[in-house]
C-alpha cells in the first residue's frame, strides 16, 4: 500500500495536516498532486506535518459572514508557516500576532472540523 493511501489529512476527516515533497528536487508543497509542481517528477512522497509553526499573517473577523459562523466571532484567520517549510491557512485565537509560535489543533467551525492555531506552550 502506498504512503499516499495511508496518510489522510483534515480534508479527509483525519486530525492531521499532510503535505508532499519531491526527492528529485527537494521541493515541498501543501496541496496534494500526483507530480511535483516544481520539476514534474511523478513520485512525490506524502508526509504528516508536525502542526508547529509561526504566524505569518493574521486578520481578525469581528462580523460573521454567515449565520453558522456567528458563534465563533471574533476569530482570526491566519497564514501559518509550518516547521516543514510550507504555508497554510487556519483559524485561530483572535489574540495571536505575527511571529507567534503556534500549534495546530482541530476544532469544529461552522459544521466542519478545521485546523485551529493556538499559542504554542
Image: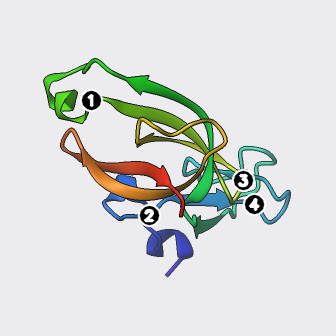
Q: CA distance from mark 2 to mark 1?
A: 24 Å
Residue labelled with disc 3? 85
- Against 60, residue 116 (above or below) is below
Decide: few, some or many residues near mark 2? Use Cα within 10 Å; few <14, some 14-19, many ≥20.
many
Identify the residue position indicated by label 4 in the image.
22
Name the residue that disc number 2 marks: 16
List x then y, in percent, for residue 83: 68, 58
Q: Earlier in the sequence, mark 2 or mark 1?
A: 2
Q: Nearer the viewer, residue 20 or 10?
A: 10
Q: Could you tell me how far apart the alpha carbons at marks 4 and 2 are, in whole angstroms? A: 20 Å
Q: Which mark is residue 73?
A: 1
Closer mark to the observer between disc 4 and disc 3: 3
Q: CA distance from mark 1 to mark 3?
A: 30 Å
Q: Give the SS element for disc 1.
A: loop
Mark 4 or mark 3, earlier in chain: 4
Disc 3 secondary structure class:
loop
1 or 3: tag closer to the N-terminus: 1
Amino acid at each position: 500500500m502506498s504512503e499516499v493511501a495511508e496518510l489522510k489529512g483534515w480534508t479527509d476527516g483525519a486530525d492531521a495536516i499532510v503535505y508532499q515533497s519531491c526527492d528529485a528536487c527537494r521541493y515541498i508543497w501543501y496541496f496534494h498532486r500526483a507530480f511535483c509542481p516544481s520539476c514534474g517528477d511523478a513520485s512525490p512522497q506524502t508526509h504528516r506535518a508536525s502542526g508547529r509553526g509561526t504566524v505569518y499573517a493574521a486578520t481578525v473577523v469581528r462580523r460573521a459572514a454567515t449565520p453558522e459562523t456567528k458563534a465563533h466571532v471574533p476569530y482570526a484567520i491566519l497564514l501559518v508557516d509550518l516547521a516543514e517549510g510550507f504555508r497554510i491557512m487556519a483559524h485561530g485565537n483572535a489574540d495571536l500576532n505575527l511571529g507567534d509560535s503556534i500549534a495546530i489543533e482541530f476544532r469544529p467551525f461552522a459544521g466542519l472540523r478545521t485546523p485551529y492555531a493556538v499559542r504554542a506552550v
